[in-house]
Image: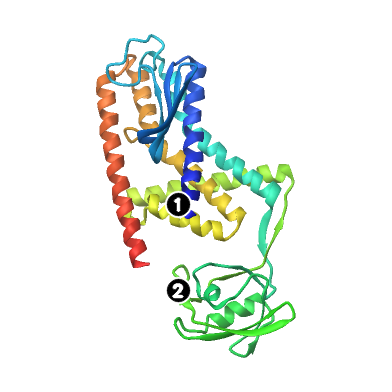
Amino acid sequence: MSIILTVIVLGVLIFVHELGHFLTARAVGIPVYEFALGFGYKVISFTKNGVEYSLRLIPLGGFVRMAGEEPGDNEDPNGYSHRTPLEKIKVAVAGPFMNLFLGLLIFIYSYAFIGLPSATNEPVIGRVISGEPAAAAGVQPGDRVLAIDGEAIGSWEQITAVMSQKHPGEKITLTIQRQEQTMNLEMAPRQSSSTGNPAIGVMGQVVYEKQGILQSISYGFQQTFMLTGALLSGLWTIITGAASSGDLAGPVGITMMVGEASQYGAIFLLSFIAFLSINLGILNLLPIPALDGARVVFALAELLRRKPIDPEKEGFIHWLGFLFLMLIIVFVTYNDILRLIKG
């Protein structure tokens, strides 16, 4: 299910990104040959109004193939290579802009129609994470914790305090109340990878407070700006060597994170999708050949030189950039698999 959900999520993000390029190219008068989701073999394709729409086998990207964009295709006077630098920049930034805008819309929707989550202090299980000790022992959402190893519990804070004194791997007994029934459930806490403390894989009850539309828009902009700043800061730490390249996540890592986010509820999943969308927008603005940021750089260079860049040379550079990006995907996928093996 995580794989299917990830393919759907990535498909939506890629579609929105390429839709930005497609609509802007058509708006400035550039003929479009193909609108594709994915790379490689064509699984499904159809043609409408002179544009081929295709779904390809590898769901790790997409593209809008425009006239005058590829080496050797310079005949059409309305093609990309004959457009002004500003028109080229408009087409290039439209994709990343759509991803940033989608992230903003997701946040606004979440706050307005689901609400801001806040945890209660009641000792009641709100969510049980599958595959964790509590789930294996039979703990269910709605169970009220009465005691841990005989020590009476009166709040969620007390659960956290008592659990912090336990040891990973050593069995504990949870006394719970489920409707009119009281039962003792045994389980062995594991060590949390995020906090280092003993954990059994449960979350407290969460209440959601819906926000007004104006407040939701304000919160949406705040969250979008905050995430954008955090992503740029994270990229800078990788560039400067302050962070390890092993921290990067690829398709396998994203699949695992989507699966984890889906277990915490709709608002957490939507927030993660918004994060991915903003991340996709920011990364595509980097000045790396084959990415939109490089196309902006070439357009700015053309504006300064007052003459176009040789399309053959630009196309070759983008081709090298595409190979570089494929190598990065292989590298981060290898890291993902190592993390998966090591747990």
Contact flag, marks 2 and 1 (Cβ < 8 Å): no
Q: Is residue 205 above or below residue 266?
A: below
Q: Mark 2 belongs to which amino acid?
A: Gly
Residue sitting at x 32%, y 17% = 305
93 vs 330, left or right, is right
Report x, y in % for residue 273.
53, 47
Q: Mark 1 belongs to which amino acid?
A: Ile
- Residue nearest the viewer, comparing 141 with 299: 141
**Marks 2 and 1, Cα distance to the nearest angstrom?**
28 Å
Q: Quadrant of the C terminus?
A: bottom left
Residue sitting at x 55%, y 73% = 135
Q: Is residue 56 above or below residue 263?
A: above
**Which disc, if any, is residue 196?**
2
**Which disc, if any, is residue 3?**
1
- Residue nearest the viewer, comparing 187 with 96: 187
Residue sitting at x 55%, y 44% = 225
Residue 123 occupies which quadrant of the picture? bottom right
